[in-house]
Image: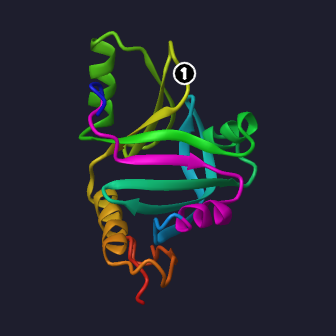
Amino acid sequence: MSKLFGPVIQQGYVVPDIEAAMQHWLARGIGPFFIEALRGYPALIRGKTVNVDLRAAFAYSGDQQIEVIQPDGDSHNIYTEYLERVPEGGLQHLAVWVESIADKLAELEAAGRPYQVIQQYGDRHAYIDSVDYPGVMIQLMAHNEMNDELFRVIHAGADNWDGVSHPIREIDWSSGRPVAPAL
């Protein structure tokens, strides 16, 4: 457990091929994967507003979430930057829960821990990196109704999975809430 951030709740991998990445984890008995496509998702990247296109898939191994992300489109973001440096893909971030992104950033600053926000999705997610020792980023995940519900849906899918059937499932957002497909 990190003394700065608490327990890591997710390993985030940026990959060039999300289908192959899901198969990698499924072959190890980790699944099912819940996949979604985000198009034109607004973000701040180093203070500049951009719209991000990506596909993301989530699964659980116990209480540890595995996320695989494949950037799509031609927007420049932390995922495309990562694949420019590491074309085969790999571990890009570790996620932790926070009650407030702004409060956590203020706490780090007050403690003399220089971190910078690299990419942020409103008050829901912020990817930060150490100024002095950059590398694997920390994703601050704010507890809120939508994030918590999404994690519950995915965790319930893993808890009830037989290890074989429906290994890849699309998250249905048509109601404005994350819904697991009826099986």
Q: Quadrant of residue 105?
A: top left
* Residue at image location 54% in from the left, 62% down from the top: 25
Measured from the top left, where is residue 113 in percent x and y?
Answer: 36, 14
Q: Quadrant of residue 179?
A: bottom left
Residue farthest to the left, as pictured: 99
Measured from the top left, where is residue 136 in percent x and y?
Answer: 52, 32
Residue farthest to the bottom, as pictured: 183
Q: Is residue 137 left or right of residue 82?
A: left
* Residue at image location 27% in from the left, 21% down from the top: 107
Q: Is residue 29 left or right of residue 110?
A: right
Q: Is residue 29 above or below residue 89?
A: below
Which color scheme did the rendering employ for the protein? rainbow
* Residue at mark 1: 134
Indicate yes or no whether the magenta region holds residue 35: no
* Residue at image location 39% in from the left, 71% down from the top: 176
Residue farthest to the top, as pictured: 112
Task: Magenta stretch: give its range.
Answer: 5-27
Helix, strand or loop at label 1? It is: loop
Measured from the top left, where is residue 140 in percent x and y?
Answer: 38, 38
Indicate yes or no whether the magenta region holds residue 20: yes
User: Mark 1: which amino acid?
Assistant: Pro
